[in-house]
Amino acid sequence: MPEMLWPRPTLRHLRRLTDDCGVIQHAKFWLPDYATGYCVDDNSRALITAVRMHRQLGDPSAHALVVRYLAFLFYAQRRDGQMRNFVDYTRTFLEELGSPDSLGRAIWGLGHAATYDEPHLAIPAREMFHRALPHITPLSPPHAQAYGVLGLCAYGEHEALREEAQRLVRPPAAVLLARYLESRTPEWDWFLPVITYGNARLAQALLRAGRLLDSTELIDAGLSSLAFLNGVCFPGDVLEVVGCHGWYPRGGKCARFDQQPIDAGALVEANLDAFQLTREARFLARAVRAMEWFYGENTLQVPLYDAQSGGCHDGLHAQGANANQGAESTVAYLMALLRLYEAQPQRFAEEELPALEADAA
């Protein structure tokens, strides 16, 4: 029986959620929920998505989105390099300083934009990137450290910037590694005493830093922690990411719901990085199974990807899929899909599904 083909990446829903300021945080079903405004978190990840989409598929609408999201981050960055995060629909900042995680995500997004093939976009992205970097300190939470490391590794993918990236990534990668080594035990091979959200990004950051620095120590720690997380999230052959209603504290019970697309997508990408480093088929198999979570191979056998809208439902509840399709979920899906499209193009349909009339206008 032939293998089922996955849908090609499409920006239809991401464009629907994006106005002339940036991507709106949340949605009511398909509709952008303007009252929820914007945030650096979502615009940073959307920037990564748009950069990848333009590079891989040459989608002209992706180029316009790169400009939009980069301009939003420029607006959100303070003169000292710090980032504000939440912006309401009137484009008024709701805080003077965003969270360390939002700063890390901004560095992550800017690291991708800094290597964009158009200098008039790459140059301001590099300036913003370097202004933000000093604010990721050894006291920053592990997730913020991981996002910063991922941004530096993306920056280092440009050959001319590789040596600089190697120099810059060593300190935060060393801090992240130290936290992992201090926290891990034979029974709990993890960075923190609780597994929460965006978990695979921690292991992925060590893997990507290890590759950039050619560090066996970093790679081994990344592989070991990822194997532990895979063991938690794959109690059988079907992905069950840690639910947000209780998380998974060390010595406690792992929450089954609500399962979030951000965690499934991160597992796809981390396992792909592990496969590319080791060529071990088990990591590719985990990446594929994590992607299939979006198409219904999950606890409830309910699809999270909506082929009509091109968006992704906001989570898997005990009763089924969340009906709303906000920015975080849709971008998490697209980021993972684009990585798999690059690595395994044979798994995808040749043509995108036709847009609905409302989207074609």
Image (spheres, rainbow, N blue to C red):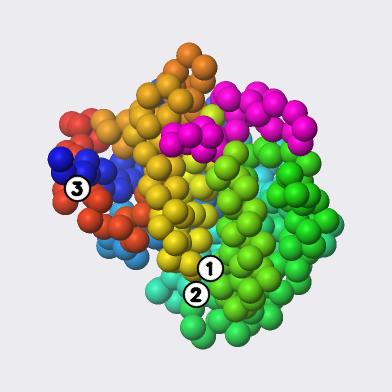
Q: Amino acid at mark 2?
A: Glu
Say few, some or many: other residues with alpha carbon within 10 Å of mark 2 (under 14 / 14 to 19 / 20 or more): some
Say if residue 321 shows up in the picture.
Answer: yes
- Image vertical order of residue 197 relative to residue 143, above or below: above
* Cα–Cα gap, marks 2 and 3: 29 Å
Residue at the outermost front position: 186
In this picture, residue 47 sits left or right of residue 222 = left
In the depicted view, which residue is nearer to us: 218 or 55? 218
- Residue 225 % position (x, y): 64, 53
Which residue is rendered at x = 52% and y = 48% of the image? Answer: 266
Which residue is identified by label 3? Answer: 349
Label disc, if present, on residue 304 of the rendered structure: none
- Magenta region, residue range: 233-258
In the depicted view, which residue is nearer to us: 76 or 51? 51
In this picture, residue 130 sits left or right of residue 138 = left
Is 247 within the magenta?
Answer: yes
Q: Amino acid at mark 1?
A: Ala
Earlier-in-chain disc, 2 versus 3: 2
Which residue is rendered at x = 31% and y = 41% of the image? Answer: 12
Which residue is identified by label 1? Answer: 154
Which residue is identified by label 2? Answer: 157
Which residue is rendered at x = 59% and y = 59% of the image? Answer: 223
Quadrant housing residue 58: bottom left
* Cα–Cα gap, marks 1 and 2: 5 Å
Mark 1 vs mark 3, foreground winner is: 3
Say few, some or many: other residues with alpha carbon within 10 Å of mark 3 (under 14 / 14 to 19 / 20 or more): some
- Residue 57 % position (x, y): 28, 60
Quadrant for the N terminus in the image: top left
- Residue 176 % position (x, y): 74, 61
